[in-house]
Image (cartoon, rainbow, N blue to C red):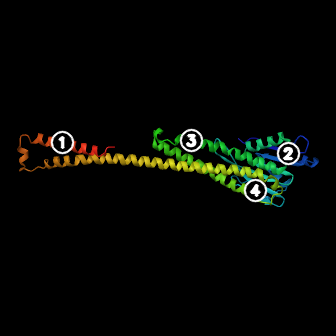
Amino acid sequence: MRRDSVLRITGFHAGREPALLERVEELQSHTFDWVWVDFDRPSAEETELLDTYFKFHPLAIEDCGHELQRPKWDQYEDMHFFVLHALQPETLQVEEVNLFVADRLVVTYHLQPSRAVEEAWRKLVNQPKHQRRGPLFAAYIVMDKLVDYYFPVVYELEDQLAELDDLDRRDSGKQLMEEVFAIRSRLLKLRKTMVPMRELLYRIINTERIPGIKEHRAFFTDVHDHLLRLNEMIDSSRELTADIRDSYLSYNSDRMNTIMKTLTVITTIFMPLTFIAGLYGMNFANMPELEWRWGYFAVLAVMALLGSGMFVWFRRKGWFR
């Protein structure tokens, strides 16, 4: 069941407590330094406000209705539009967070509840020094909180790989491979999210097209550094999954070679015995040994000595190791 939508309008003014408004029309009767409007699971009527009230570009509004786009940044006249990815740590489900940044306005738009947006809003409301920095700093806090939720997922996968990185403790090689490929699949899913986010932050910190970016570049650089670290951790974990897979295949191949060598030695021992048994099993009338009284016992003795001798010889050569 769809939860009720939440439209949170917060006005910030230097030296005053943040003001919470119920309707966007109330903004016309206030003179805030800047405003943050958060569309949480918006209804169709609330989504219309992006066009009717805020006058955002129709392409940006259209992008808000498309789920799971690639993280990106678009500039429309005096407004900047960002598509960001939020990550649910429990399920690895990727959710889109859209961010509009203007001179005195920040608008967040997301179809699912976002803990990152909620934490960013609380951080701004509770710390007046951050409120004075304006909309671009609010955008930084949202991105920073989104990236912070990537770390627990990557750490958890690293812990799972650490448990798998010991073949002697695994009872089933098939189970090991299933777990390794499951983790590798999750790592690939994470990489598809984090690499575009890293490229997005790289574009932000290397542009001059965003007003005020010079004063805030250090903050966005910090988020970019976090994403670099995450990507390195993911690449390292993917290499570890490949190492575990190769180690298992090598271990399994060596084990199979040992089994085949043992079977080959046993077969080699029985080859002369089979030859002797086949030789005296031929149904010819003129076979003098068949009339010998001790022939049967002599053949058994020869076969026993031959088999034992070959066994001892192979063992001394280490073919049973």
Residue at 56% of width from left, 48% of height from top? 184
Residue at 80% of width from left, 57% of height from top? 80
Where on the picture, by quarter, is residue 159? top right
Relative to 74, say whether 260 is above or below.
above
Residue at 75% of width from left, 52% of height from top? 220
Count residues near mark 2 (Cα–Cα under 10 Å), then give few for <14, some for 14-19, many for 20+. many
- Distance from label 3 to label 2 (Cα)? 41 Å
- Residue 194 visible (yes or no): yes
- Distance from label 3 to label 1 (Cα)? 55 Å
**10 on left or right of 141:** right
Q: Circle 3 sits on which residue?
A: 160
Residue 255 in percent (x, y) is at: 39, 46
- Between 265 and 314, the residue placed more toward the observer is 314
Q: Circle 2 sits on which residue?
A: 131
- Distance from label 4 to label 2 (Cα)? 21 Å
Q: Quadrant of the C terminus?
A: top left
- Distance from label 1 to label 2 (Cα)? 95 Å
Secondary element type, mark 4 = helix
Mark before the other along the chain sequence, 1 or 2: 2
Q: Circle 4 sits on which residue?
A: 205
Mark before the other along the chain sequence, 3 or 1: 3
